[in-house]
Amino acid sequence: MEKLKSRILQDGKCFPGGILKVDSFINHQMDPNLMMEVAKEFGRLFADAPINKVVTIEASGIAPAILVGYIMQLPVVFIKKKEPKTMENMLTAAVHSFTKDRTYTVCISADYLTSNDHVLFIDDFLANGNASTGVIELCRKAGAQIEGMGFIIEKAFQQGGETLRQLGIRYEALATVESLDNCEIKLR
Ligand code: G4P
């Protein structure tokens, strides 16, 4: 998506350790016009897939996911990163965060992810694919089918894309970062 790519080149910042900061338009301050265009693009790319639910993970996935849900007129559920005391019929999965170097339990109510669901998973970044493998685990437990995954930005130098390809999961990224070496953003 050309508009996204030029915004990343214009406003994205490189941090040591291969981190791309997009805090001024995605991760902290958000640009609703750009986000709406992102959502429309996901809607276009997945128009042929038999999806009945959009799933994301808090926090940064929620903004694009709700707009995708609006565009596709589908319900949106977000996976929680803290186990609520009051959640009934909870499904859980362990997710290891590479960037934060800790493992945490993510959860979703089995009331909102069931064997009737055909899921489109939306998130901001595909990096090591840890969030994605957590979602795969939750869908497996629920008996839900993953029809596709959409990421705003993929970091091609980390292994998340390879993991999803090996699992045969269809995914789309709207911008792909080839390298952040020498603090220079190189997009595909
Ligand atoms: P994953 O995203 O593929 O699961 O892999 P990883 O474990 O490496 O990522 C952990 C967290 O760091 C994720 O967010 C992910 O979106 C974010 N992340 C990974 N690489 C980058 C990057 O280059 N730039 C930015 N801005 N974020 C990156 P999270 O911890 O779940 O946070 P949030 O969704 O609550 O913001």
Image: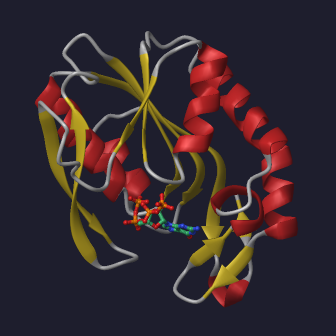
Is residue 129 visible in the rendered image? The answer is yes
Tell me if 18 is positioned left or right of 22 in this view: left
Residue at image position (66%, 63%) is 28
Indicate the quadrant containing the N terminus: top left, top right, bottom left or bottom right.
Answer: top right
Question: Foreground residue, 48 or 74?
Answer: 74
Q: Is residue 1 visible?
A: no
Q: Where is residue 72, by image quadrant?
A: top right
Residue 18 percent coordinates (x, y): 55, 80
Residue at position x 19%, y 15% in the image = 115
> Relative to 185, does residue 75 appear above or below in the rendering?
above
**Rendered-image quadrant of the C terminus:** bottom right
Q: Would residue 75 be found to the left or right of residue 44 on screen?
A: left
Q: Residue at x 16, y 26 (%)?
A: 142
Q: Position of residue 73 (x, y in %)?
A: 58, 12
Q: Is residue 56 left or right of residue 124?
A: left
The x and y percentages for residue 166 are 29, 44
